[in-house]
Image (cartoon, rainbow, N blue to C red):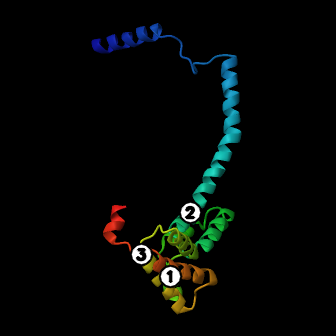
Amino acid sequence: MKHQRSLISLVIVLSLLSPAAQASFLQGDALDSVAKWLALFIIFAMPIGGIYLFWMIHILPEKIAEKRHHPQKDAIKTLCLLSLVFGGLLWPFAWLWAYTKPVIYKQAYGTEKHADYYLEAGEKAMKQEMSQDEIRTLRQELDQIAAKGHLTAELQRVREQLIAAETLSPAVSPSAEGAR
């Protein structure tokens, strides 16, 4: 009981000694000015930032499909845009589709890469930025596509470029390639 009385008296003394509590370190016109600018930021900048973030998240599957040279990247892009219209309900499907390996597509067309992959590879081969083994592998992939009858005119040109690069460039050994 005696201990409880001393504790109560200590709390009373400390509460009388403490200064008045302040809700903000700002006062008067400074507080009004900061509140006005904070409100404007919340009203205008936050929705713009939210829309931008929503857009960036919704095009992630498209970016992933492009990076992985997915053969159906145009369809994935369309699904991402449709997902924006439907409030994001289709986005998980686009995400999964971007990460799937197109096994049936490969069986049907002989490749699991988009045509852009081969166009970029043809440019690299002509600039002699690829080893003979890489050129040979790409040419064999294009030969498989041609055997299935799905080689477009531009891929036929890439195949011809790879054949020319294979015959023109000097043979590079794997050990010399690793030393570069």
Secondary structure at badge 1 equals helix
Secondary structure at badge 2 equals helix
Q: Residues within 10 Å of mark 2 (few under 14, many from 20)?
A: some
* Cα gap from disc 2 to disc 1, whole angstroms: 31 Å
The answer to whether residue 142 shows anywhere in this view is yes
Q: Sequence-wise, which precedes: disc 2 or disc 1?
A: 2
- Numbered disc in front, either 2 or 1: 1
Residue 91, position as x, y percentages in the image: 58, 65
* Cα gap from disc 3 to disc 2, whole angstroms: 30 Å
Q: Sequence-wise, which precedes: disc 3 or disc 2?
A: 2
Q: Residue drawn at (37%, 10%), measured in percent from left and top? A: 10
Q: Residue drawn at (67%, 36%), measured in percent from left and top? A: 41
For residue 179, what is the image quadrant? bottom left
Q: Which residue is mark 1?
A: 163
Q: Nearer the viewer, residue 3 or 143?
A: 143
* Cα gap from disc 1 to disc 3, whole angstroms: 11 Å
**Figure check: 11 above or below 39:** above
The reply to whether dot 1 and dot 3 touch (C-beta < 8 Å) is no
Instruction: Name the quadrant of the C terminus.
Output: bottom left
- Identify which amino acid the numbered label 3 is placed on: Gln
- Identify which amino acid the numbered label 1 is placed on: Ile
Residue 53 placement, left or right of 5: right
The residue most toward the left is 2
Q: Which residue is mark 2?
A: 63
The reply to whether dot 3 and dot 2 touch (C-beta < 8 Å) is no
Instruction: Name the quadrant of the N terminus.
Output: top left
Q: Which residue is mark 3?
A: 132
